[in-house]
Image: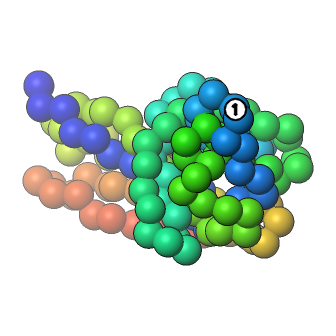
């Protein structure tokens, strides 16, 4: 069995609301955002800062639902500042043969300036013979 790493969840253009160097690691994310795309508490995520190009890996912890909070903690707080735009990506390992047979779906939120869902997208890999077709579609907000 060949394992591949695929994106399963993405928070696109979320805005840093706070950066807390005194907290022990992680990134705090509004729980509603995590739930909507399927990021679990303590799940590893990659974070990309669109304002300065810095990129790091950490783990997600849920913040207060509905408040739109995005807070890099610990050392990551030194890689950004409030109002920076981030992309947060979560991955999963899948069996390549299974993906080729059954496909794969990733959930994406494009955030507004308050870290609420502006667009909700689903990105699918759809089996077509011996290959996969990539489809992106706007789902219900």
Expressed as whole percent of the image width and height from the top left, the position of residue 15 reads 70, 64
Number of marks in picture: 1
Q: Quadrant of residue 116?
A: bottom right
Q: Which residue does the image show at 49% across and 37% down from the upper left?
A: 58
The answer to whether residue 72 is above or below residue 62 is below
The answer to whether residue 12 is above or below residue 73 is below
Expressed as whole percent of the image width and height from the top left, the position of residue 68 reads 82, 53
Toward the viewer: 131 or 8?
Answer: 8
Residue designated by label 1 = 23
Q: Which residue does the image show at 65% across and 68% down from the upper left?
A: 84
Q: Would residue 122 be seen by someone viewing this image from the given angle?
A: no
* The C terminus sits in image quarter: bottom right
Q: Which residue does the image show at 50% across and 72% down from the upper left?
A: 52
- Please rate how many residues cluster around mark 1, counting C-alpha atoms within 10 Å: few if below 14, some from 14 to 19, many from 20: few
* The N terminus sits in image quarter: top left
Expressed as whole percent of the image width and height from the top left, the position of residue 64 reads 85, 38
Q: Quadrant of residue 101?
A: top left
Is 84 left or right of 56, judged from the image as shown? Answer: right
Say which element carries label 1. Answer: loop
Toward the viewer: 97 or 2?
Answer: 2
Q: Quadrant of residue 57?
A: top left
Expressed as whole percent of the image width and height from the top left, the position of residue 133 reads 28, 63
Is 13 left or right of 10, judged from the image as shown? Answer: right
Q: Which residue does the image show at 44% across and 62% down from the upper left?
A: 54
Q: Would residue 59 be seen by someone viewing this image from the given angle?
A: yes
What colouring does the structure picture have?
Answer: rainbow
């Amino acid at each position: 069995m060949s394992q591949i790493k695929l994106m399963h969840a993405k928070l696109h253009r979320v805005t840093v609301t706070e950066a807390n160097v005194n907290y022990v690691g992680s990134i705090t994310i509004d729980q509603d955002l995590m739930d909507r795309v399927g990021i679990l508490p303590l799940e590893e995520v990659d974070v990309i800062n669109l304002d300065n190009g810095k990129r790091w890996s950490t783990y997600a912890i849920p913040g207060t639902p509905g408040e739109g909070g995005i807070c890099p903690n610990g050392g990551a707080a030194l890689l950004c500042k409030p109002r920076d735009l981030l992309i947060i990506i979560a991955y999963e390992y899948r069996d390549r043969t299974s993906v080729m047979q059954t496909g794969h779906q990733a959930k994406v939120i494009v955030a507004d300036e308050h870290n609420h869902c502006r667009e909700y997208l689903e990105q699918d890999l759809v089996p077509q013979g011996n290959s996969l077709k990539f489809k992106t579609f706007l789902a219900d907000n």
